[in-house]
Amino acid sequence: MFDWDDTNTDHVRRHGIEPNDVEEALTDPRRLSVAAYNTAGEARRGVLGATSAGRVLIVVITKRAGRTRVITAYDADRAEKKRYRTRGK
């Protein structure tokens, strides 16, 4: 389902995040789409989601060959965490 290799695995780890945390955030049933844009001719979108431990992440993804390719992931800032936690209230 997710397209991982040394490049994107190493990249998210530089942000202090493990690939399994990214996958949890991407499969979070409460996740939100936060941005959609084009970079170098490739459609990308941001997802705001949480891990089972409650860590709220922003994950940037794209679709390549029918698979979800993680571009980057990082901890959500205070405003993004608030948006995630209070949406729908």
Image (tube, rainbow, N blue to C red):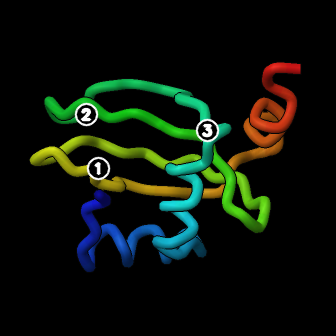
Q: Which mark is residue 31?
A: 3
Type of amino acid under label 1: Thr
The residue to which callout 2 is attached is 39
| Residue wearing tag 1 | 68
Mark 3 is surrounded, within 10 Å at the Cα level, by few (under 14), some (14 to 19) or many (20 or more) other residues, namely some
Query: Where is residue 87 shown, x and y percent of the image?
Result: 79, 25
Q: Identify the residue at horizontal 62%, vertical 41% (top origin).
A: 29
Percent across and percent down for residue 82 are: 84, 36
Above or below: residue 18 compared with residue 84: below
Q: CA distance from mark 3 to mark 2?
A: 22 Å
Tag 3: residue type?
A: Arg
Q: Depth check: 73 or 26 in front?
A: 26
Q: Disc 3 to disc 1, how far (Cα)? A: 15 Å
Give x and y (percent) for residue 18. 53, 75
Q: Nearer the viewer, mark 3 or mark 2?
A: 3
Is 46 on the left-hand or right-hand side of 86? left
Where is residue 76 drawn, in percent x and y?
Answer: 69, 48
- Amino acid type at circle 2 is Thr
Helix, strand or loop status at disc 2: strand
What residue is rendered at 89% in x and 20% in y?
89
Judged from the image, the secondary structure of the residue bearing numbered disc 1 is strand
Nearer-N-terminus badge (3/2) = 3
- Cβ atoms at labels 3 and 2 below 8 Å apart: no
> What residue lies at 14% left-to-right and 30% top-to-bottom?
41
Q: CA distance from mark 2 to mark 1?
A: 16 Å
